[in-house]
């Protein structure tokens, strides 16, 4: 499907891994997320430089900031759906920040970027999420690499269980959170559980640190969830990162 057509369909039909702010440190109560809703769109592009140029022009137009919304573009390092190599996430602090039903005909920035863009890109997944848990100490700019676990929860206790596990595993040097699927989750996805780091090296070091306890966690959660996929992404358009 053409990226332009897919994006238009998503925006008009609804009329939504992740940002970080200066919030709670390890074992403190999680602070409110800077965004409540997010729209995650995975795409396959054959012109990444052009894709980034278009995205930056749109972000810099101010149409999102005017509503209090924001966006980030990520390169998908591993785990993209159906060949997807880039992911764009739009962030909304509340329902009022969502686009109007007329945005694709009334906003010149939307028309210029998505209505007449000739790039042969394909959208392969679009999912609306609501953030239900968010912890991110430090500065927003320090979190560049995210690992996400798309999960199908099979037990009502799953969210409380994973919150406890994430808090126990965290060192205070990483961001983490849980997004709940509103619409569009593939293969029965109900939640996205994510961790954010300053680099891929920090991600790998953390996986090594927790490896010894991995089997214990898997056994504990076997009856509560099914992992549908894992993905690693890196933010590459920082100028549009939510504040």
Image (cartoon, rainbow, N blue to C red):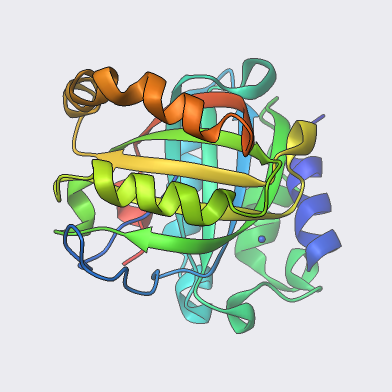
Question: Residue 100's spot in the image, x, y percent?
Answer: 74, 76
128 is higher (above) or lower (below) than 223: below
- The residue positioned 77% from the left and 46% from the top of the image is 184
Of 205 and 18, the residue lying toward us:
205
Quick check: 95 above or below 213? below
Measured from the top left, where is residue 68 in percent x and y?
A: 47, 78
The residue depicted at 30 percent of the width and 60 percent of the height is 135
Q: Position of residue 76 (x, y in %)?
A: 47, 25
The total of numbered circles placed on residues is 0
Compared across the picture, whether 236 is left or right of 131 comes to left
Image point (17%, 47%), residue name: 142
Most foreground residue, 222 or 83: 222
Q: Residue at x 57, y 48 (%)?
A: 158
Task: Please state which of residues 169 and 87 is positioned toward the viewer in this rendering.
Answer: 169
Q: Where's the C terminus, which quadrant?
A: bottom left
Q: Quadrant of residue 92?
A: bottom right
Judging depth in this view, the residue of 53 and 32 nearest the camera is: 32
Residue 128 seen: yes
Q: Residue furthest bottom?
A: 96
* Residue 207 in view in this figure: no
In this picture, residue 55 sits left or right of residue 109? left
Quarter containing the N terminus: top right
Q: Image check: 156 left or right of 144?
A: right
Query: Quarter of the image holding residue 60?
Result: bottom left
Residue 188 placement, left or right of 192: right
Name the spot of residue 196 as percent of width and height, x first: 30, 42
């Amino acid at each position: 499907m053409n990226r332009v057509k897919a994006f238009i369909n998503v925006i008009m039909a609804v009329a939504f891994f992740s940002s970080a702010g200066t919030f709670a440190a390890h074992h403190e109560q999680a602070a409110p997320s800077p965004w409540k809703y997010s729209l995650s769109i995975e795409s396959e592009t054959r012109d990444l430089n052009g894709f980034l140029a278009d995205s930056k022009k749109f972000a810099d137009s101010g149409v999102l900031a005017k509503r209090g919304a924001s966006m980030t573009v990520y390169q998908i390092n591993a785990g993209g759906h159906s060949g997807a190599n880039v992911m764009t996430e739009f962030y909304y602090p509340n329902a009022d920040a969502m686009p109007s039903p007329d945005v694709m005909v009334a906003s010149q920035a939307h028309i210029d970027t998505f209505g007449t863009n000739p790039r042969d890109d394909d959208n392969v997944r679009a999912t609306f999420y609501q953030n239900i848990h968010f912890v991110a100490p430090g500065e927003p700019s320090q979190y560049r690499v995210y690992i996400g676990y798309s999960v199908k929860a099979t037990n009502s206790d799953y969210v409380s269980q994973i919150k406890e596990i994430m808090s126990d595993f965290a060192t205070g040097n990483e961001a983490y959170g849980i997004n709940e699927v509103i619409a569009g989750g593939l293969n029965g996805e109900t939640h996205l559980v994510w961790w954010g780091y300053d680099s891929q090296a920090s991600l790998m070091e953390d996986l090594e640190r927790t490896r010894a306890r991995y089997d214990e966690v898997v056994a504990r959660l076997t009856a509560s969830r099914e992992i549908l996929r894992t993905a690693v992404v890196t933010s590459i358009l920082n100028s549009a990162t939510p504040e």
